[in-house]
Image: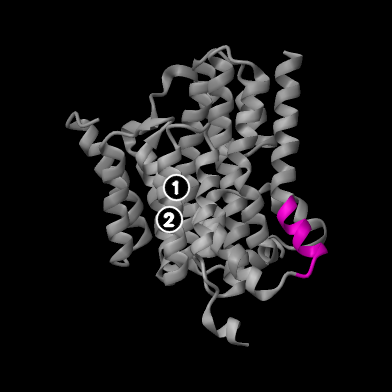
Amino acid sequence: MTGLLAAIAILAVGTFALRFAGPALRSRYEIPERVQGLLAAAAIVLLTALVATAALTDGTGSAGIARPAGVLVGGILAWRKAPFVLIVVAAAATAAGLRLLGVP
Amino acid sequence: MSMRSIWRTLDPRLARDIGLVCLADGVVGISYGAISVGGGLPWWVPVLLSIVVFAGASQFLFVGIVAAAGSPIAAMIAGLLVNTRHVAFGLALSDEIGSGWRRWPGSHLMTDENVAFAIGQDDPRQRRAAYWAAGIGIFICWNLGTLVGSAAGSVIADTDVFGLDAAFPAVLLALVLPALRDRSTRTAALVGVVVALATTPFLPAGLPVLCALTGLLFYRAPVLEVAR
């Protein structure tokens, strides 16, 4: 139990440090405008990669068909500038509906 | 920025969108609590993690490893690896997080969702309001959900039945899509996606997404600034 508590404490402190590092570094050093553009792009690149891995993979394997199909429907609606609520509900409903039909 | 000024600044439509994501996060929190307790962990483990770690993906990973009788050290390292992306988020959003004492709660409230909400806004005040409103809302809903889930235990089924696992990538995609209209950013992001997917079978969770940063090699700063 002590080992578990220690692991939780280190994960908590470590995660906070990772979150705090960005703003702390930015306040200490003057960052050129071009690098700021690169940092903004880095956040977009990470989020996009997160979308792809969360949509298509599960652990080290494939996520099946229902989930990517749902994300695809949500993505198309987002591209067509549909309301946010519709995007979210359609993505979830597509995946849930396909699973109801037995699609993995 | 005070609570009142967050609500005054926040566009009503944006507030509704944020509310929806908070609600969905709450439901996922219920499933997280239930899965943890169902896996044999005492109720306070998922609850404590939600308060002090507050990072969904790393929490799922942590309880998954510990419940499967893995070592807590391995679970802790896996959780930290998944959270390394927060460094890049913090570098990009330091203005939204704020300075002084605000930086402490502002850093703790950082999630994929509120980062994406902030990036999705053009106006700097909306960006900041979105970051904080989504951060606070998600923190409350995630923790309430965890409490409910860990109390209900294994009664609750997997939320995959409701398709929520498809809703979250769709939320992030909808929020980053406007930024991907910039050609240089889009190229970098697409290269990043290919690298992340190609490395997923071989690397532990969290690292493939970090590898996506190699896509930045294809990023070119806007011509205007180079010419200056």
What colour scheme has been applied to the protein in the rendered image? one colour
Queried whether the magenta region covers residue A37, the answer comes back as no
- In the rendered view, does A99 fall on the left or right side of A13? left
The chain carrying label 1 is: B
Image quadrant assignment for residue B88: bottom right
Which residue position is annotated with label 2? B191
Give how far apart the Cα atoms at labels 1 and 2 are. Answer: 6 Å
Q: Is any part of residue A82 visible from this angle?
A: no
Residue B155 picture location, percent across and down = 42, 19
Residue B112 picture location, percent across and down = 54, 50
Q: Furthest-bottom residue in view? A: B228
Name the foreground residue: B31 vs B202. B202
Image quadrant where one finds the C terminus of chain A: top left
Image quadrant assignment for residue A12: top right
Name the foreground residue: B70 vs B118. B70
Which residue type does callout 1 highlight?
Val
The chain carrying label 2 is: B
Q: Which residues are magenta?
A: A21-30
Which residue position is annotated with label 1? B195
Q: Are marks 1 and 2 in contact (CB under 8 Å)?
A: yes
Q: Residue at x 37, y 43 (%)?
A: A55
- Please determine whether, in this image, residue A2 is positioned above or below residue A54: above
Q: Are marks 1 and 2 on the same chain?
A: yes
